[in-house]
Image (spheres, rainbow, N blue to C red):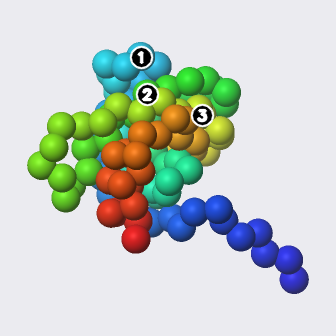
Amino acid sequence: MFTKKRRYPRAKVSIPVEWGTAPNCGYKGVILILSLSGCLIQAPLYASPGQVVFVRLSLPEEGEDAHVVRGLIKYQMEGMGLGVEFMELTDEDKRLIRDIVD
């Protein structure tokens, strides 16, 4: 049996998040799955695959300001949320995500 190996480990989480089509991130949701490559955001709104979005990450262990990262909608799961692939993460963004996932 063939199994696809993921590039980065994923973690099931419940992290409140703001996201949107502009850097001010006008919508609210919850990150359910997080990895260095992206996340699954539970959100009641529809976004088209291929659309660029911004995600404001405020990770629970950090007392720092939120980080806004750019992402690309890879898929929309009816009743579940948005699959977002992160684009151009800084080293600090990667460190914050690794602290949650590892």
- Crowding near the residue tagged with mark 2, few <14, some 14–19, many ≥20 C-alpha atoms within 10 Å: many
For numbered disc 3, what is the local secondary structure? strand
From mark 3 to mark 2, how far is it between C-alphas? 10 Å
For numbered disc 2, what is the local secondary structure? strand
- Residue 66 visible at all: yes
Q: Say the numbered circle drawn on residue 54.
A: 2
- Crowding near the residue tagged with mark 3, few <14, some 14–19, many ≥20 C-alpha atoms within 10 Å: many
Question: In front: 95, or 54?
Answer: 95
- Crowding near the residue tagged with mark 1, few <14, some 14–19, many ≥20 C-alpha atoms within 10 Å: few
Q: Earlier in the sequence, mark 1 or mark 3?
A: 1
**Identity of the residue furthest to the left in this view:** 63
The kind of residue tagged 1 is Ala
Q: Say the numbered circle drawn on residue 22.
A: 1
Image quadrant holding the N terminus, namely bottom right
Q: Position of residue 97 (x, y in %)?
A: 38, 55
Q: Position of residue 16 (x, y in %)?
A: 28, 46
Q: Say the numbered circle drawn on residue 57.
A: none
Image quadrant holding the C terminus, namely bottom left
Rendered image quadrant of residue 73? top right
Vertical order, 20 against 12 (above or below): above
Q: Earlier in the sequence, mark 3 or mark 2?
A: 2
- Labels 1 and 3 touching (C-beta < 8 A): no
Residue matched to label 3: 73
Q: In screen coordinates, is 41 left or right of 2?
A: left
Rendered image quadrant of residue 25? top left
Q: In screen coordinates, is 82 left or right of 25?
A: right
Q: Earlier in the sequence, mark 1 or mark 2?
A: 1
From mark 1 to mark 3, how far is it between C-alphas? 14 Å
Q: Position of residue 53 (x, y in %)?
A: 49, 26
